[in-house]
Image (cartoon, rainbow, N blue to C red):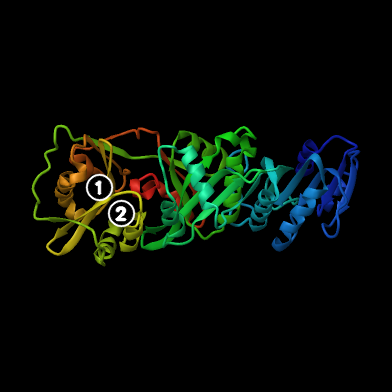
Amino acid sequence: MPLVAHLESLLPAPPARVLCLACPDVYECLGGSGLDLHRSDGTGTIEGAFGAIVWGIERAREEIGEAVGRLRKALAEGAELIVVAPLEPGEPTPSKRQGALPSSRQTKLREVVRHLSETGFTVRKDQDLRWPPEDARGPGGWKVLVARRDPFLVRSYRQGDEGAVLDLFRTCFPHDRRQLDHWRWKYAGNPHGPSRISLAVSPGGELAAHYGGYPSPVWRRGRSFTALVVGDTMTDESFRHTAHGRGGLLARTVRHFFSIHRDGELGFYYGFNTGPIQRFCRWFIGGSETYPVGYWARQLDPAPAWSGTGGYRIWRLDALDDDPDRLFRRVAPSYGFLTRRDSRYLDWRYRRCPDTRYVILAAYRWTRLVGWSVFRRRGEVIDWGDALFGPAHLRAVEPLLTAALAEPEMAGAKRIEAWFPENPAWWRDRVEELGFVAGPEPKGLGMVALGDAEPEAFAALGEMYYTMGDGDLF
């Protein structure tokens, strides 16, 4: 039995005291190992202390939390809890070296991971064991987790945590003096649904790590769903030495996050991260994808030859009505796959943001809105942070950019930068015609994503139209 052979490599040497919980087949197969074996169905009192516990997940979800607490008390100091869960056929395995985070279908396993995190366990090893489907000893393989007691806890956000979150953010990102109103806008005031946050807490109650995300509306080929933008990934430097690899605080926080929120309600998860976090995601978040950011820039000295109105009127979009909704319905099919950039999104994302001054300009043909863009000044750079036009009115982009440069807060800028992907090709070509040059993103940023309820959209993520505004860095 491949599972038993693997467990024997994980168990302590005989005559260690080992408990087999709800694993009758494993108990029988280990009978000749010389271990001091005990068997339990998981009910009633479990007398410790055991040198190891092998736990097969066969209990109802509502009983798992109680079981984890009892098993923690039954483990001897330094002993390990070995969790065994069946894998369904077709569950993806990213590599032989590592296991994937539990999928939305693995509801019991996700519940186990959640309670391990919240009860004070760290998962030291995570492996998927597989064999041909004709093997009658399992449905397709087993997920094996090896956990050990740890003084750090990982849990979900609770009301009142935001002060500690902001303190940690300022410590990790001292250049960004984020205030409470920004946190409330981003996480508590998002009109597209509840935000998700997991936190690691030290034995002394200090916030040690944070992983959070906020919902974003997505449209693809006529269908709307919600994705989650993940950001504010951070660990207090004073706690980074506590463990490494899968036992590191950030890895534990991410594991807890997806054990709760990878529940089939969100299409996919994505964010824009630097190289170290990209590598972390590829290594740890099994099944993740990474796409380089489509970076564009144009020098503004000498001034670009953008002039004239081309028959379009350019206004600041200081008040929102139904015009952005109608524009989105008209042009979305030409993009195919993008954030739902309607009035509701524009109002929350740019007009309500409390600590960033955005300039929102709109292009009109007669009384009809045909396109808009969002800009921000950053030192000598203008960030062209968002844009939505249809292919029928691409000539409106030039007078809109001209108007942006004429805004008082843009005076003296030396360069304009933007993020636009290869798709749609008609937009990419227009950006190039305007004198922008594509190149590597200066900070090495890339889009990192993990799939969930919309596998087709996730597989086609390279076709998604995005801008700086689709992440949390703009």
Q: Can you identify the residue that label 1 sits on?
A: 427
Which amino acid type corresponds to the residue marked 1 in the rendered image? Trp
Residue 372 percent location from the top left of the image: 23, 54
Closest to the observer: 212 or 293? 212
Classify the position of the C terminus by image quarter: top left
Q: Can you identify the residue that label 2 sits on?
A: 335
Badge 1 marks a residue whose secondary structure is helix
Q: Is residue 358 left or right of residue 187?
A: left
Badge 2 marks a residue whose secondary structure is helix
Label 2 neighbourhood size at 10 Å, few (<14), some (14-19), many (20+)?
A: many
Which amino acid type corresponds to the residue marked 2 in the rendered image? Tyr
Residue 144 badge: none
Q: Residue at x 83, y 60 (%)?
A: 43
Classify the position of the N terminus by image quarter: top right
Residue 283 percent location from the top left of the image: 56, 37
Real-space CA distance between mark 1 and mark 2, rounded to the nearest whole angstrom: 9 Å
Residue 282 visible somewhere in the drawing: yes
- Of labels 1 and 2, earlier in sequence is 2
The reply to whether dot 1 and dot 2 touch (C-beta < 8 Å) is: yes
Residue 230 percent location from the top left of the image: 47, 48
Q: Residue at x 9, y 44 (%)?
A: 307
Q: Residue at x 35, y 54 (%)?
A: 353
How many labels, in total? Answer: 2
